Image: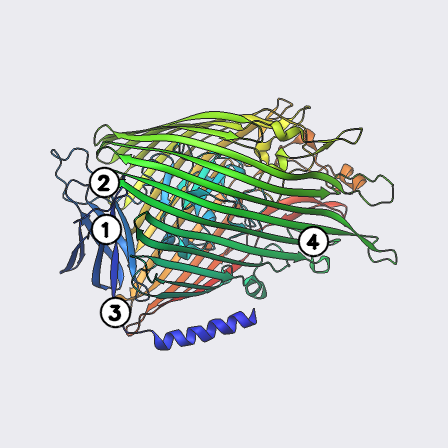
Amino acid sequence: MKRHFLLFLSILSFVTTTAYSQNGLQTVKGQVIDQQSELPLIGATVEFVFGTTSKGAVTDIDGYFVLEGIPIGRQTFQFNYLGYEPLTLPNVVVDAGKQVFLEVTMEEAVNKLNEVVIVGKVEKDRAQNEMATVSSRQFSMEEVNRYSGGRSDVARLAGNFAGVSTADDSRNDIVIRGNSPTGVLWRLEGIPIPSPNHFSTIGTTGGPVSALNTNLLKNSDFITSAFPAEYGNALSGVFDIGFRKGNRDEFEVTLQLGAITGFEGMLEGPLKGSKGGSFLVAARQSSVGIAQSLGAEIGTNAVPNYQDISFNVDLGKSKLGRFSIFGIAGLSDIFFDRDEVDGTDLFSADDEDAKADSQFGVLGIKNNYVLDDKSYVRTILSASGSRVKFNRDRYYNMDTSEEFVDRFVQGDDALARISLSSFVNKKYNANLTARAGILMERYSADLSFESAEFGIDTDQNGVFDLISVYDFDGNTFGVEPYVQAQYKVSSKWTLNGGLHLQYNSINDQLVTEPRFAANWKVAPKHTLNIGYGLHHQNQPLPIALAENMSDVGIRTMPNKNLEFTRSNHFVLSHDYKIASSWRSKVEVYYQHLDNVPVESTPSPFSMLNVGADFGFPIDKNNLVNEGSGSNMGVELTLEKFFTKGYYVLATGSLFDSKYKGSDGVRRNTAFNNQYVFNLLAGKEFRFGKSKKNAFSIDTKVTTAGGRFYTPVDLEASRVNQIEVFDDSRAFEEQYDPYFRFDLKIGFKFNSNKRKLVQSFYLDIQNVTDNENIFSSSYNRQTNEINDVYQIGFFPNFIYKVEF
């Protein structure tokens, strides 16, 4: 770590003395395309107005424009094109260190002859995907990095939105409207990917640290219900992430040092020999040890180590269309030493050593081929994979002459998949756009897991036997065709409809899923939205491939034929544009789930309560699709977008999440917080010559109801020396409410003489050091139930330089 730090300082010293002069001005450029056809708009006008000064440009044959000599600061740009709705982009951050590239989409007007528009509209809450018109919003790289307490993590950013609960400081699992985190779909550049998190495990969607580098992200979408027909194999939500393109005209560098994100270097620039191509690559090395040395609590005394690399290479125009190559890869490992464990550790015990290694990667190639002036074909081919190795060794007869160690848990899971996605998009006219496509995936799995947690001691020697939980080496495949269309009846009515099919070879099941949404602009400032979606998801492989040993020693996989879990989503919302930069939204929803795996004999177990951990239950090897569940609630969002130097975001959710196991009893789910409230606000103060520098202060307050849990059966745990739960009281107890106050202070300095910007942020999380409970667990050493608390006071810092 010391070597990385010295290298970082050496490069920084070189940079600050060699970056060339910019005279306090910067270049802003971008591309303007049609929202539905995604084809470039030739001759669109771009205007920058600053006081009495204005600059203009016109897009070229590829839709590109360039504006030079733009002052440093937050600026506003207006876009106009004949027959299209005018568009205004306010508060575009222009810094000395990097040129700005804007990806602009414009919407063709439906009623051209009767409409006279003077002021362009701003719809920052609108999703990038034009067919995602309910329960969706876009988010930007600036928001991810601006909000307090986010740790530069897009998943934690989602916790600020209505309907999302992330009341677990140790992981970034996304709980949407009471659903398990396993119901989330991650997509990168239009293709499904494994969980993009360090220390993640097969079948889960979250982890302690995100591997998605926020400096590469472009504006992306987050969808929480009734998603369009192109999204499948998900029950609760979609993260549709995209990488931005590199600068196609100049080389630029970003260096960053952060307590969580670590040491980072990013390089971008033109791709030599291509027609308008570029490259963008970034790598990071963890530095959590620095934060721990400063007294930060991360939930364990063990030092996590992780590295990741991300890239996006735009190969430029060719006769076969435009190709790009993208990818992300991550490595992580951690060792839990029993001699360094204390009672506050969330992940280990003082009589065990544990070692975890994880790897994952995605490599893809994307092609965009224009068929004519109304349609295009987009095809993405990717290879992705992940591997997780985990070993736990338990010490017996500790601190005696008869002390010995024996393997307690060992797992080695490797999963690889080849994915091919292709769709054709056609804009028939300003009213009608249609899209049809298919996703095909082939999985190769080599999974094995053994555990002594069953508490079986065959030879009565005091050491539990290692029992196989699953052992599978084989292939599976899935197919998901879909068709969807958007029809604008008028400037007030928009209809979206689609059909999604899903097939998987594990259970040989084919399902059909209708999707529908309607948007009615009741008045200039009021819009009603309604949506419905039928969604299915296959079971996580560790559950689907769980083994059962018969009395005669024959291994079977009873869960292999489990059907998809099924979910019906119903959504109704009202959007109110209070003012040009203020909006409110009220949304009510109901979700019914059935075909949920539960045990074949009466019990409170349900797969709806699984997924917010590093693994899955090891003893659920005889499940049936006879469970059910429901989620209902109301959500409120009040938002002021960043204007006049400040922003406000207030979100609230009141919800109820229930389920039924095979015992027929209706209970609270593990994710039924019942309420979540967030309040975020920030103010930016400009100072220095020409107000080029900035001081910012951001804050966030979060409170949520405590989660319901099943209490430990203390006597049974003492007898068996493993944690045993009292299933007769399943999810009857509730933890205390969660509360956290975060404060972030930042400085940004734009050089007057060099192409250079330096930023420093101090993000203090859990300022009040509030004790939020993590779990009440059985401690083998004390033979008692002990409370373990989440992360306390945590000072996170980031230093960033761009040139």
Which amino acid is tagged 2?
Asp
Residue 422 screen position, x and y as percent: 39, 38
Which amino acid is tagged 1?
Asp
Question: In this rendering, would 173 be left or right of 161?
Answer: right
Distance from disc 2 to disc 3, alpha carbons, whole Å, reads 41 Å
Distance from disc 2 to disc 1, alpha carbons, whole Å, reads 13 Å
Which amino acid is tagged 3?
Gly
Is residue 235 at all visible to an observer of this figure? no
Mark 3 packing: few (<14 Cα in 10 Å), some, or many (20+)? Answer: many
Question: In this rendering, would 34 be left or right of 533?
Answer: left
Verify CB contact (< 8 Å) between mark 2 and mark 3: no
How has the structure been colored for display?
Answer: rainbow
Is residue 93 at all visible to an observer of this figure? yes
Distance from disc 4 to disc 1, alpha carbons, whole Å, reads 55 Å
The numbered dot on residue 62 is 1
Distance from disc 3 to disc 1, alpha carbons, whole Å, reads 29 Å
The numbered dot on residue 354 is 4
The numbered dot on residue 373 is 2
Residue 360 screen position, x and y as percent: 54, 50
| Image depth: mark 2 or mark 4 in front | 2
The numbered dot on residue 24 is 3
* Among the two numbered marks 4 and 1 on one chain, the one whose residue lies closer to the N terminus: 1
